[in-house]
């Protein structure tokens, strides 16, 4: 879980994530001109981790009043999980398994995030965003959290999508 980084107009992405740019530069140089002892397989996990964090945390400055916090979960393939573990990158993450539930159009994959937490999350309010099926989404979320006493509302932002 991490705070969102709201990009300001006058700052470049490089100023927000200098380590990521250093890692990407090192990977690119090594790809073009490999150095002895510097294997691209050893450099990529760090760059991947930094890029994942940066992408998950970025948001346009226009949304800064939300003071958003994000939870990002990625379902890793077994080979990538092994590569990250071998490099020491994976040590800070707990591995979450992909489960499936039956949906209207077949099986839907999901990751159970807080089943083993043993306490309630600090969620005070849920706003169900605009969508073609906002009422159905609202009802589904309400059923999911009904016993937790969480305030819910539908977003007043109009849905303008086509699908």
Image: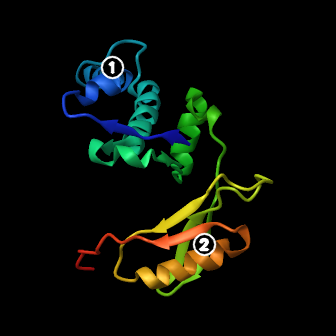
In the orientation shown, which residue stands out farthest toward the left?
Answer: 10
In the orientation shown, which residue stands out farthest toward the bottom?
Answer: 104
Residue under numbered circle 1: 22
**Residue 59: image location, x then y, percent:** 33, 45
Say if 119 sits above or below 102 in the image.
Answer: above
Identify the mark nearer the N-term, 1 or 2: 1
Local crowd size for mark 1, using a 10 Å CA cut-off: few (<14), some (14–19), many (≥20): few
Residue at 53%, 36% (x, y): give it. Answer: 83
Q: Quadrant of residue 50?
A: top left
Say if 153 sits above or below 97 in the image.
Answer: below
Residue under numbered circle 2: 100
Helix, strand, or loop for circle 2? Answer: strand
Q: CA distance from mark 1 to mark 2?
A: 38 Å
The C terminus: image quadrant: bottom left
Contact (Cβ within 8 Å) of mark 1 with mark 2: no
Q: Nearer the viewer, residue 16 or 86?
A: 16
Labelled disc at residue 10:
none
**Residue 106: image location, x then y, percent:** 51, 83
**Residue 138: image location, x then y, percent:** 50, 78
Helix, strand, or loop for circle 1? Answer: helix
Q: Quadrant of residue 67?
A: top left
Asked if residue 132 lies left or right of residue 96, the reply is: left
Q: Nearer the viewer, residue 76 or 42?
A: 76
Q: Quadrant of residue 145?
A: bottom right
């Amino acid at each position: 879980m991490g705070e969102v980084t709201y990009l300001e107009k006058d700052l470049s992405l490089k100023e927000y994530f200098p380590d990521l740019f250093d890692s990407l530069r090192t990977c690119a140089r090594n790809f073009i001109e490999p150095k002895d002892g510097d294997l691209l397989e050893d450099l990529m996990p760090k760059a991947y981790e930094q890029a994942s964090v940066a992408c998950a945390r970025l948001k346009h400055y226009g949304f800064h009043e939300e003071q958003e916090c994000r939870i990002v979960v990625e379902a890793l393939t077994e080979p990538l999980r092994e590569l990250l573990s071998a490099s020491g990158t994976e040590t800070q993450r707990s591995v979450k398994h992909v489960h499936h539930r039956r949906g209207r159009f077949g099986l839907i994959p999901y990751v159970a995030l807080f089943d083993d937490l043993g306490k309630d999350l600090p969620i005070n309010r849920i706003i169900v965003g605009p969508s073609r099926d906002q009422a159905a989404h609202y009802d589904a979320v309400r059923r999911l959290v009904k016993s937790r006493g969480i305030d819910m509302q539908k977003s007043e932002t109009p849905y303008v999508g086509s699908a």
